[in-house]
Image (spheres, grey):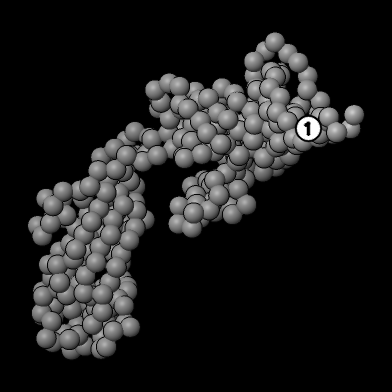
């Protein structure tokens, strides 16, 4: 009789009930500070510089090094996780179609490998970018100024190269944004790996669109790449050195609009690891504006005697972002 039976992996499909304990946020995030004068730095540190939690690091690794995608995410979409802990035990039948399970290990009465198909909310962030035209970044554009390096009232002609009489300086605020993250002029650097002092300078930066051009949130940002022959040992009168371009710079720039949008998706996910095998977006994605409507808004001071937060005798600043 033993020759009539074999033991090998099998597959079984059934429907179970799962618990949904999370939902997409619908309101701006509320927070507080004991030091009320720099909420922007606090948000920057908390949201973007914390290596253990920020998505910026993992996104850069994924894009540049073909790293693995986060759990419950695929191709830029993130799917609202569902509690699938029930799948670690025996199958529990239910008439509610929340998940479909396959690969049941009858020997262990548990699921050694599970694929779950479910319908769940999804969200993604993307940027919609448009190249700036030659009119915006050409020779007569506001990105740089032509300067007379022989003008001794502005430049220290006794120290500067006398053979370079015309140069170019990048403006602090070209077009509708700042050149760097803040409205300052770049003061270095050129590549000195070449022979002599002449070298190339490359500036790659993105900066947010100035509020006077766009008051809505999220505001557009400008990504830019500037390349030219440059010198850093040009001295303005009386004392500091400046970055001077010795040719008209080559400029490429994109005006980008951040878009955060949601939809409903059918997802097939590994019930043990959260790895998404495939998905299908069911609805036309719509912008999710409400949760990100506040650009660090002042919500006033909190009660310093509120025992829930242990802020006794401290000045507490409340804000939303």
**Image quadrant of residue 303?**
top right
Q: Residues within 10 Å of mark 1 (few under 14, many from 20)?
A: some
Left-right relation of 265 to 232:
right
Which residue is label 1 attached to?
A: 105
Residue 221 visible in image: yes
Left-right relation of 188 to 270:
left
- The percent coordinates of residue 75 (x first, y second) are 47, 40
Q: Residue at x 52, y 34 (%)?
A: 278
**6 or 115: which is nearer to us?**
6
> Residue most toward the right?
1
- The percent coordinates of residue 248 (x first, y second) are 14, 67
- The percent coordinates of residue 109 (x first, y second) are 84, 29
Q: Residue at x 18, y 78 (%)?
A: 155
Q: Residue at x 65, y 22 (%)?
A: 99
Left-right relation of 189 to 25:
left
Residue 298 visible in image: no
- Up/down of 239 relative to 123, above or below: below
- The percent coordinates of residue 202 (x first, y second) are 29, 68
**305 or 199: which is nearer to us?**
199
């Amino acid at each position: 009789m033993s020759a009539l039976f074999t033991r090998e992996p099998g597959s079984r499909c059934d429907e179970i009930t799962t618990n949904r304990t999370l939902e997409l946020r619908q309101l701006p995030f509320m927070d507080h500070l004991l030091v009320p004068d720099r909420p922007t730095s606090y948000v920057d540190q908390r949201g973007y510089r914390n290596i253990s939690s920020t998505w910026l690091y993992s996104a850069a690794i994924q894009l540049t090094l073909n790293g693995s995608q986060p759990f419950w995410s695929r191709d830029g979409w993130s799917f609202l996780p569902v509690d699938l802990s029930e799948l670690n035990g025996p199958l529990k039948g239910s008439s509610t179609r929340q998940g479909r399970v396959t690969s049941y290990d009858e020997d262990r009465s548990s699921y050694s490998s599970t694929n779950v198909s479910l319908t769940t909310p999804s969200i993604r962030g993307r940027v919609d970018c448009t190249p700036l035209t030659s009119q915006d970044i050409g020779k007569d554009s506001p990105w740089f100024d032509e300067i007379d390096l022989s003008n001794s009232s502005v430049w220290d002609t006794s120290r500067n190269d006398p053979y370079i009489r015309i140069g170019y300086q990048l403006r602090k605020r070209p077009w509708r944004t700042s050149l760097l993250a803040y409205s300052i002029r770049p003061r270095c650097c050129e590549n000195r790996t070449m022979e002599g002092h002449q070298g190339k300078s490359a500036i790659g930066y993105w900066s947010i669109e100035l509020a006077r051009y766009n008051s809505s949130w999220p505001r557009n940002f400008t990504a830019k790449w500037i390349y030219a022959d440059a010198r850093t040992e040009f001295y303005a009168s009386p004392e500091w050195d400046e970055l001077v371009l010795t040719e008209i710079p080559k400029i490429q720039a994109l005006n980008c609009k951040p878009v955060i949008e949601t939809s409903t998706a059918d997802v097939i996910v590994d019930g043990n690891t959260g790895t998404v095998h495939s998905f299908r977006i069911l609805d036309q994605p719509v912008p999710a504006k409400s949760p990100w409507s506040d650009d660090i808004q002042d919500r006033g001071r909190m009660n310093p005697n509120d025992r829930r937060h242990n802020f006794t005798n401290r000045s507490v600043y409340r804000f939303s972002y």
